[in-house]
Amino acid sequence: MASAVPRAAKRLRLTNTPGYVCTDCRRAFAASTQPRLQQQPPPQPPPSQHVGQTAKTTHFGFETVAEELKASKVRTVFSSVASSYDTMNDLMSLGIHRLWKDHFVRSLNPGIRPTPPPPRPPPPPPQSQRILDIAGGTGDIAFRLLDHATTTNRDPHTSVLISDINPQMLAEGRKRCLSTPYHATNRVSFLEANAEDLSAIESSSIDLYTVAFGIRNFTHKATALREAYRVLKPGGVFACLEFTPNLANPVLNALYKRWSFGAIPLIGQLVAGDRESYQYLVESIEKFPSQREFAAMVRETGFLVPGDAEGGGWEDLSMGIAAVHKGVKPV
Amino acid sequence: MSLTPMALRSVLRTPTGLRPLLLQAPRALYHSYEHAQPPPYREAESAILSSAFTYVPTHGFTQEALTLGAKDAGYLDISTNLFPKGAFELVKYHLTTQRLGLKDRIQFPDGQMGVGRKVRSLVLERLRANADTGVINRWQEALALMSLAENIPASLRELSALSDEIWFLSGDISVDTSWYTKRASLSAIYAATEVYQTTDKSTDFKDTEQFLDRRLEELRVMGGAVGNTLEWVGFQGGALVNLLRSKGVRI
């Protein structure tokens, strides 16, 4: 069954872009076969984004690109997936991403429960939280956060600022906002910004900073973490939901890799008509630091990581396919 | 990393290849004079938990008490995310701090009491701490939280650590299998007595004291019976072997 997927992928491959192929090996192989394949066009000269040793580079999936190009490439990926984002997420994760997001929001418990007012007037002004949802273009997490604050904690004041680098994703979010009860209130606002430079947001003004399935696309994760640390109030919480590169169980890991490299680009090709973007998606998961490494990064930024004493500092979801990382800015 | 002179000496005595192992695990699972135990909570955590604990008598072991405590400590509502287990973290805080504080609550004059008497007073002192901190009326909530499946491992670990602490403070230095049986039986007795304490309405917990005495007496009788039975079985076994040998069986 599992082997049928790559075979189907091979049959359906319309472009001549191979699936899961190490680009370095591919280039070496192309160079070695070049003399024999005279009728083929000569191997392309390294494109401009494949820069030399001296310039600063970063990874874009399995490719190596110049640092300044990554943001625009990520933007292109998400521009092309914006419209079919939800359908694709459902197909790729078999719907489990909704459970992860629900759990993520429930465990954060946003919103402030109203306290019974003290007997003597005047009653205190209603308290509210300011939440910043980074890379939250379509508002998936933002509306869940507001729903939890409103229905569970009876807090009608907490507001969310949705920030995304990509205008298409934000447009999708604005469209969705119209069908929520929050569109007539001032509880949702949108900001187009790079998470590594949140200069539009003043320091120590945010209660909760969330980033769900976004941080692996950032060029400089440490810079983004420092920026999160800056905008959070003392006591504010950084929370990140992200895929992990490897599952703890080697057998399940092999099956999972089979699924992500065999099926996901194929589903992307069939449903969204865009294989490249989904190939990037699975490759970027592979390149993301492991839970331990990322928890160490959060700690180095200065956050207090919950559950540090037990040696962990993160929470695995679905046997470690995704993980929740949290950090509290000390007072 | 700071090492006590004793610990440094034992590190230097170890072969070079094994030294990283010693440096990696400065935590001992037993009472160690060489390894200083790290404090159980970080500064921010103990600030929030200790102020949250003052709300337990009124608000119970709840998320609400934790939130109020966080606010009192200068943190935000959302900062309770520092405690993934929520209200159970408050229970654990009480268990841990009272366990570590037990050695300061009670001092024994040298050579006056036997180990058994010391264990009895230590258990009573630990139970009195439940009443002194004012959480005894809320302790059934805590027991309920501890019995939730996801919290059982942590609760049992804490119970065995308390039992170990009590035997250590009572001056027990057994190095045979009774090290285990002593800790296991004391854990069972302590857990039973604590459950009894939550329903005890007598003055100064007189009934709890009597309950504990009955359990300890049972343990003494039981321990004696088991010990005697084992001795008898061992003797009879030896006699049987000797008997068979005398009849020419090659054993």
Image (spheres, coloured by chain):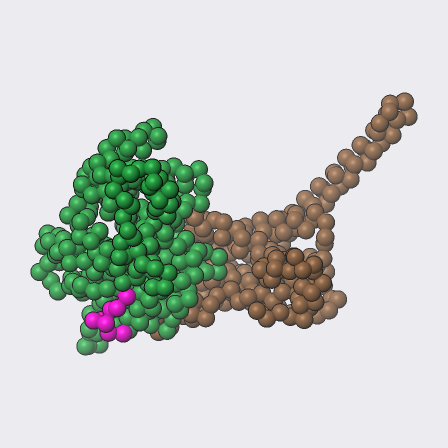
Chain colours: A green, B brown
| Whole-percent x, y for residue B138 in the image | 42, 59
| Whole-percent x, y for residue B214 in the image | 62, 51
The image quadrant where one finds the N terminus of chain A is top left
Task: Relative to B40, say whether A86 is above or below.
Answer: above
Task: Relative to B45, say whether B85 is above or below.
Answer: above
For the image, the number of numbered tags is: 0
Identify the residue shown where x is 12% and y is 56%: A171
Identify which residue, A225 or A158, lies in the foreground. Answer: A225
Task: Relative to A270, say whether B213 is above or below.
Answer: below
Q: Quadrant of residue A66?
A: bottom left
| Whole-percent x, y for residue A147 in the image | 20, 55
Q: Which residues are magenta?
A: A196-203
| Whole-percent x, y for residue A213 in the image | 29, 53
Q: Left or right: where does residue B37 sit relative to residue A205?
A: right
Identify the residue shown where x is 28% and y is 33%: A10
Identify which residue, B185 or A151, lies in the foreground. Answer: A151
State whether the magenta stretch is mostly helix, strand or loop: loop
Q: Left or right: where does residue A206 sit relative to residue B12?
A: left
Identify the residue shown where x is 67% and y is 68%: B8
Task: Relative to A161, say whether A97 is above or below.
Answer: above
Q: Left or right: where does residue B217 sit relative to residue A306?
A: right
Q: Does residue A143 show up?
A: no
The image quadrant where one finds the C terminus of chain A is bottom left
Q: Is residue A67 magenta?
A: no
Q: Does residue A82 show up?
A: yes
Identify the residue shown where x is 32% and y is 48%: A283
Query: Can you name the residue that lies furthest to the top here?
Result: B248
